[in-house]
Image: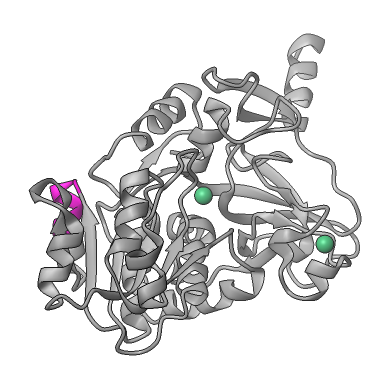
Amino acid sequence: MDIESWTFRVERLLSMKAVRLMQLGKPLQDAEVAIPALGPSDLLVRVAACGICHSDAHYRAGISSIDSLPVTPGHEVAGRVEAVGEEVTHVSPGDRVCIHYLVSCGACDFCLRGNEQFCTKVQMIGKHRDGGYAEFIAVPGRNVIALPDEISFEQGAIMMCSSATALHALKKARLKSGESVAIFGFGGLGYSALQLARAFDCGEGYVVDVNSAKLLRAAALGGVPIDANAGDPVQQILHATSGKGVDVAIELVGSAPTMQQAVRCLAVQGRAAMVALSRESVSLLPYPGLINKEAEVIGVSDHLASELPVLMDLACGGKLCFPEGTLRPVSLNATQINAALDAVEKSTDHIRTVVVPRS
Ligand SMILES: [Zn+2]
Ligand SMILES: [Zn+2]
């Protein structure tokens, strides 16, 4: 072998493919970057699956602020441990893991109270530090959770955002057994929210969407489909509940009309959990909408590492699943990822697209 090709091979061993955001408002680009170095408490994960999330489209568009570029997006990551720092003892190379996407300090008041999403030094993977649109990702050892063999890497990855945030939303909305729920938007979060609400023994689960394939999926999971194209969803929900409304509404679309609908469809003492990112403002009539019903509007931000084991248990028990046809794989390739990000800005038939680096 000549020196040039030998040098190329050695460099390739130390570098990896990544798809990166170089400039806000521009398509992501293919890049060859160094494999990240590990500190003593870090580990390196070989990415097996990374979900493509609506938030990534917001980052690309410049809707959510990003402090420093370039950055590798992707915060829904599952894979195998490739290497560990000397202080990491709870996992070993070869272990299947998922990654909690918030890297927090563990020492500030918020972290000590178990609200690490508000950590004063929090870094979100794929936004403040490099994420999973890459062959490898380095994270602190405490950010990984074991992924049982019976859960696929693709499902494990999207559970780290869609399912985890849906679970946090249901907890923030204090859903109780027997209570009815309305879910606005049936993408990855809505698909998880309906299954989780049913796992927690909810009453009727109404699913509002405009996509007929998604409404069919909701019905197949035991939900009551509400076609927003067929008239005001609030009137349809009121009609189906004999005028009572629902106890809990989960808003996952982020448009002013759906945010209003999530509040207007509430029953007496109902709770609306607002999850989707939005730049739109919403107006409400406070007396009929909130005061006269003692209704509540609740903000939901991310989720907690402590909630992730619940998801693993539910998935192992078959109560949270993403069957054939709900997930669409794409390669670790800027063209394919940009097209998928374009698609999440519209309503597509599948629930979630997942980057599979080896596909
Ligand atoms: Zn996400
Ligand atoms: Zn902290």
33 inside magenta stretch: no
- Where ligand 2 lies, by image quadrant? bottom right
**Residue at point 37%, 53% (across, down):** 259
Residues in magenta, as a range = 210-217
User: Please, is residue 324 above or below residue 73 in the view?
Assistant: below
The part of the image, by quadrant, that contains residue 101 is bottom right
For the point 54% across and 62% down, the residue is 300
What color scheme is it?
Answer: one colour
Q: Quadrant of residue 218?
A: bottom left
Whole-percent x and y of residue 343?
34, 32
- Of residues 269 and 225, which is closer to you in this image? 269
Left or right: 262 with respect to 152?
left
Asked if the magenta segment contains residue 212, the reply would be: yes
Looking at the image, is 25 positioned above or below residue 272? above
Taking the spot 35% from the left edge, 65% from the top edge, the residue there is 289
Which quarter of the rendered picture does the C terminus lie within?
Answer: top left
